[in-house]
Amino acid sequence: MDRRQRFEKYDWLISKTQSILKNYECPESCNASCCRHHIIDFRRKEYEKILKNVDKESANILKSNAVKSELEGCYKAIVGQCPLLTNSKCRIYNNRPEACRNFPFVIFPDPEAGFGLTLLLCPISVNIIQDYAQWYKSVNLTMYNQLTAVYEQYKNIGENNDFCIQMKEQNLDSFIEFLEKK
């Protein structure tokens, strides 16, 4: 897969995750685990755009806490609890990076497919898993049973942050259609 194809696939996955996420909202009870436990990666243009569009204090916090990213194609990263998190709320929510906009989905490099898609555990992802299981009910009963068991195990997520499930790209369009009809 050449560089252009990789970027096209990445953009395609971003659009699919956004189509799924528009059907969900973070509950008020969310403890912002995405901002406390996960690495936030920025592309160069995104990082510079955020710095231009946030208040000076937030920009200074971001500059002093961002480090060189280990992820291919990314420029800067925040590791551990995001310093822009105040009382479980994001200081730059309307200007947050793409990684934050897509959470609980994480797009990861895959040597063969270019990129893959993983769903990490959070209150929204538990709801996505429940809906994904319902979608699978008409497609594959074994997978439906497995996803239903996962939902039952994690529906009261508490402090459990070690979960992830890989989403198959060939299922995304049908799953989105299922959500839109719901």
Image (tube, helix red, strand yellow):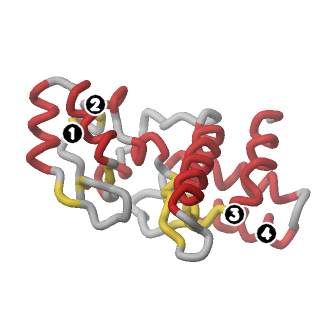
Amino acid type at circle 1 is: Leu
Q: In this view, does 117 lie to the left or right of 34?
A: right
Residue depicted at 83% across the width and 72% down the height:
142
Amino acid type at circle 3 is: Lys
Percent x, y of residue 158? 43, 57
Q: Which of marks 4 and 2 is nearer the N terminus?
A: 2
User: How far apart, in angstroms, are the residues tagged by discs 4 and 2?
Assistant: 38 Å
> Cβ–Cβ below 8 Å for labels 1 and 2?
yes
Q: Is mark 3 on a helix, strand or loop?
A: loop
Residue 1 — which label?
A: none
Residue 84 — which label?
A: 1
Amino acid type at circle 2 is: Ile
Residue 92 — which label?
A: 2
Classify mark 2: residues with Cα within 10 Å, few (<14), some (14-19) or many (20+): some
Classify mark 1: residues with Cα within 10 Å, few (<14), some (14-19) or many (20+): many
Percent x, y of residue 76? 24, 53
Q: In this view, does 166 lie above or below 177?
A: below
Q: Which of marks 1 and 3 is in front?
A: 3
Q: In this view, does 108 lie to the left or right of 9?
A: left
Q: Which of marks 3 and 2 is nearer the N terminus?
A: 2
Q: Is residue 108 left or right of residue 79?
A: right
Q: Earlier in the sequence, mark 1 or mark 3?
A: 1
Percent x, y of residue 87? 23, 36
Residue depicted at 55% across the width and 62% down the height:
118
- Provide the residue designation for mark 4: 143
Q: Quadrant of residue 71?
A: bottom left
